[in-house]
């Protein structure tokens, strides 16, 4: 006989861990107890040594789907001759440091009940259990207990209470437990916010969607705008009402088979789609899909997710090939999540609102993922992933990192864990900025952490920087933008050693006061050195150049030819007066800050190919360039690498010249775009080889928003692998500015 104490840390509370342990102990015939405590779960088990061993193995291999075991320690203690196995009550104090689980899609057991006419929760849109349902979005404070969730509004009925109290029920301590008798209810509102008197809001909502109406539907972390994705007129109408917004609409399809009818789904993609986090997954469209073209115009991809709440399953069960389910917001505003606010903001867009009375406490957007180079890559880490801890190799005093300005996220550290927030958005928008501050407060309160230092970007005008310097009252640590990108990728891989950082993005504030964005660094989590970069190029109009790619095309043409070559016709749509003024100012260096940006070179090439002269969101032109590129045309254009002050300077002048003559010769857009990608990939390998000679390093990190580009990333990987580099790319943390806060935190922790 032996007795073991097993201490488990991670996400092990509020996810059905204790009933799981209880049933496992019964199965193995072991005695003892299980309880929640400050770090996680502690188990004591007594029995034959061999059986104890099997028990521990089964804890690891059969753990509940939502749980994450970060560590499991066993120690032998003295045998007590205990009888039976008990679930011990934990005191409030003990559960305070527990980690709250992310929101999770409705599990198979609950789905069975949802569609079982004999079940008391038949067709009940808020069915959940300890293995599934809302978590992060409904938590108002800690400990994670019903009174501190938005389910506090719903006292449990006797049946639900009995399940909640029964250690072997799969709803034991399921805080959001509910049924049609005691739980939240659906309601249908007209566009003016008045309730529609109707027996069955769900059927009415489905009927209206089938008629082609736009519905605002309250989800887990916010509202979606929904239309029938097969109805071209309805999709176009939604696009018209959302104004100026050209972003692709996300889709929700009923099941994997339905997804396969509209898009190509590989094994890795299927795993992402079916994962408990249920992100939006970017998938290549099938040529014969029957959906509206305006869902993602000029784009080879659909963003598709599977249903994740019971309500979604009910909506999609009859008749829709897919629904458009796009975040309910106008351009740069945050996603609507409060009922009054949603009705006000969306009244002009939606004909009706399908809402319910379970409040959303924390706004959380859908996550977005794709498969790149055979690995999953998160482009937006949000609902389903937050607030799961991410890798952090160092134990440090608590740090708050406030991230970048676009695609903002924040990061809070506790001990040796880092907690990355949900996607916050573009801080220039006032409501997003409010949401940024709320997120900081909320994460601090649910993690019970008071940060002692605050890490921020070098850019003095970022709202996040200003918050750090002016409002936080904490000692500050400034972290250069591209160093943060590099550090976020190293941290994700748990790598402490130095690496060559190939950091390509739009714009980040450089240590020399210029704008950086095509950078070669050598560095680790402690520091970095800039060893190479794109040639500095004037950005006519500053920020405006980001919205109007023609300005970057103009900038390159002027610096190469001193004028616009006659063969280039792309400026016909620009007013002659404006064009002349911008050209003059750029030649004189007025209102044309210097940038070594890779993203802006993508913009210039996209404009030269006349793909886009203006964009409605950053990176749109670059995205289109990737979409049109023919991957079978990697033959590189020439470029120059020069050396100045120990820096390698990449000069794309010969490349731009050849593109102009290719255009004159009538070469296809696909071919030019393909060759452009190939040139950058070859250049990356070229520069890294030179850096390796100097530094002896052969570990390369690819990070920055440009590496959301699948074609470039895969081409660069191929070139680098051929030259025996070891390459780290992102997977769990976005390569774009959504990952900056993690990088800032890890750099600050090392200082
Ligand atoms: Zn469930
Ligand atoms: Zn009930
Ligand atoms: Fe960046």
Image (cartoon, rainbow, N blue to C red):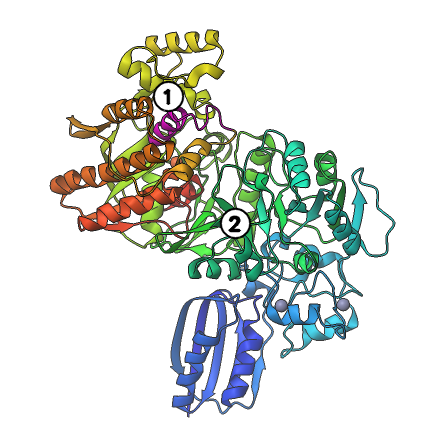
Query: Real-space Cα distance between discs 2 and 1?
Result: 33 Å
Disc 1 is placed on an element classified as helix
Specify which label sits upstream in the sequence, 2 or 1.
2
Residue 674 in which image quadrant = top left
Specify the label residue 367 is tagged with: 2
Residue 336 is left or right of residue 68, and the answer is: right
- x 55%, y 56%: residue: 261
Residue 291 is left or right of residue 415, and the answer is: right
Specify the label residue 430 is tagged with: none
Asked whether 613 falls inside the magenta stretch, the response is: yes
**What main secondary structure does the magenta stretch of the protein show?**
helix
- Circle 2 residues within 10 Å: few <14, some 14–19, many ≥20: many
Q: Quadrant of ligand 3?
A: top left
The x and y percentages for residue 22 are 55, 80
Q: Is residue 476 visible?
A: no
Range drawn in magenta: 598-615
Observer-nearest of 297 and 180: 297
Question: How many numbered marks appear?
Answer: 2
Asked whether 14 falls inside the magenta stretch, the response is: no
Give the residue number, with chain letter if any, for mark 1: 553
């Amino acid at each position: 006989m032996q007795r073991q104490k097993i201490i488990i840390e991670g996400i092990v509370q509020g996810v059905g861990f204790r009933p799981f342990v209880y049933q496992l102990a019964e199965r193995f015939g072991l005695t003892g107890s299980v309880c929640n405590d400050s770090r996680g779960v502690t188990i004591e088990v007594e029995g034959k040594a061999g059986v104890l061993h099997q028990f521990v193995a089964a804890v690891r291999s059969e753990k509940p789907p939502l749980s994450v075991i970060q560590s499991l320690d066993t120690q032998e203690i003295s045998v007590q001759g205990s009888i039976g196995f008990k679930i011990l009550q934990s005191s409030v104090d003990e559960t305070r440091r527990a980690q709250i689980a992310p929101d999770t899609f409705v599990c198979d057991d609950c789905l069975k009940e949802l569609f079982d006419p004999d079940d008391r929760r038949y067709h009940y849109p808020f069915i959940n259990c300890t293995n599934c349902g809302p978590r992060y979005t409904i938590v108002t404070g800690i400990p994670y207990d019903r009174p501190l969730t938005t389910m506090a509004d719903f006292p449990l009925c006797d049946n639900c209470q009995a399940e909640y109290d029964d250690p072997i029920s799969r709803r034991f301590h399921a805080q959001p437990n509910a049924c049609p008798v005691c739980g939240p209810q659906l309601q249908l509102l007209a566009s003016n916010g008045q309730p529609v008197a109707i027996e069955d809001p769900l059927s009415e909502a489905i009927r209206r969607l089938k008629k082609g109406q736009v519905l605002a539907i309250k989800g887990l972390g916010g509202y979606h705008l929904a239309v029938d994705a097969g109805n071209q007129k309805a999709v176009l109408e939604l696009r018209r009402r959302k104004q100026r917004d050209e972003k692709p609409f996300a889709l929700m399809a009923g099941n994997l088979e339905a997804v396969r009818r509209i898009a190509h789904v590989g094994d890795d993609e299927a795993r992402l789609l079916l994962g408990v986090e249920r992100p939006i997954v970017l998938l290549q469209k099938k040529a014969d899909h029957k959906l509206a073209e305006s869902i993602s115009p000029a784009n080879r991809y659909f963003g598709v997710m599977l249903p994740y709440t019971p309500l979604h399953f009910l909506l999609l069960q009859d008749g829709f090939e897919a629904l458009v389910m796009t975040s309910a917001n106008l351009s740069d505003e945050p996603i609507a999540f409060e009922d009054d606010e949603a009705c006000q903001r969306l009244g002009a867009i939606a004909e009706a609102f399908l809402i319910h009375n379970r409040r959303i406490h924390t706004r959380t957007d859908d996550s977005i993922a794709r498969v790149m180079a055979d690995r999953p890559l998160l482009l937006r880490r949000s609902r389903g992933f937050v607030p799961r801890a991410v890798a952090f190799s160092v134990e440090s005093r608590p740090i708050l990192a406030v991230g970048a300005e676009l695609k903002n996220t924040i990061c809070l550290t506790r001990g040796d864990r880092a907690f990355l927030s949900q996607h916050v958005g573009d801080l220039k928008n006032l409501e997003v900025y409010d949401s940024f501050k709320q997120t900081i407060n909320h994460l601090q309160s649910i993690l019970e952490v008071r940060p002692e230092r605050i890490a921020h970007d070098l850019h003095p005008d970022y709202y996040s920087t200003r918050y750090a310097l002016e409002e936080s009252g904490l000692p500050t640590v400034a972290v250069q933008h591209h160093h943060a990108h590099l550090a976020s990728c190293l941290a994700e891989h748990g790598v402490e050693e130095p690496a060559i950082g190939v950091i390509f993005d739009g714009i980040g504030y450089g240590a020399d006061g210029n704008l950086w964005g095509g950078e070669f660094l050598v560095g680790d989590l402690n520091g970095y050195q800039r060893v190479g970069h794109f040639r500095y190029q004037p950005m006519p109009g500053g920020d405006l150049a980001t919205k109007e790619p023609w300005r970057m095309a103009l900038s390159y043409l002027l610096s190469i030819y001193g004028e616009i070559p006659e063969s280039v016709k792309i400026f016909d749509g620009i007013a002659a007066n404006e064009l002349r003024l911008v050209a003059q100012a750029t030649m004189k260096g007025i209102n044309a800050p210097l940038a070594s940006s890779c993203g802006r070179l993508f913009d210039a090439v996209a404009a030269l190919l006349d793909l886009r002269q203006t964009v409605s969101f950053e990176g749109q032109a670059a995205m289109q360039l990737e979409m049109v590129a023919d991957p079978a045309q990697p033959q590189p254009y020439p470029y120059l690498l020069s050396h100045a002050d120990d820096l390698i300077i990449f000069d794309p002048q010969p490349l731009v010249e050849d593109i102009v003559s290719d255009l004159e010769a009538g070469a296809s857009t696909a071919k030019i775009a393909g060759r452009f990608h190939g040139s950058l990939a070859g250049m990356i390998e070229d520069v890294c080889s030179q850096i390796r000679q100097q530094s002896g390093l052969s570990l390369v990190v690819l990070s920055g928003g440009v590496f959301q580009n699948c074609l470039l990333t895969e081409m660069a990987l191929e070139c680098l692998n051929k030259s025996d580099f070891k390459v780290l790319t992102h997977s769990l943390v976005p390569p774009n500015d959504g990952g900056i806060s993690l990088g800032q935190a890890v750099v600050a922790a090392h200082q």
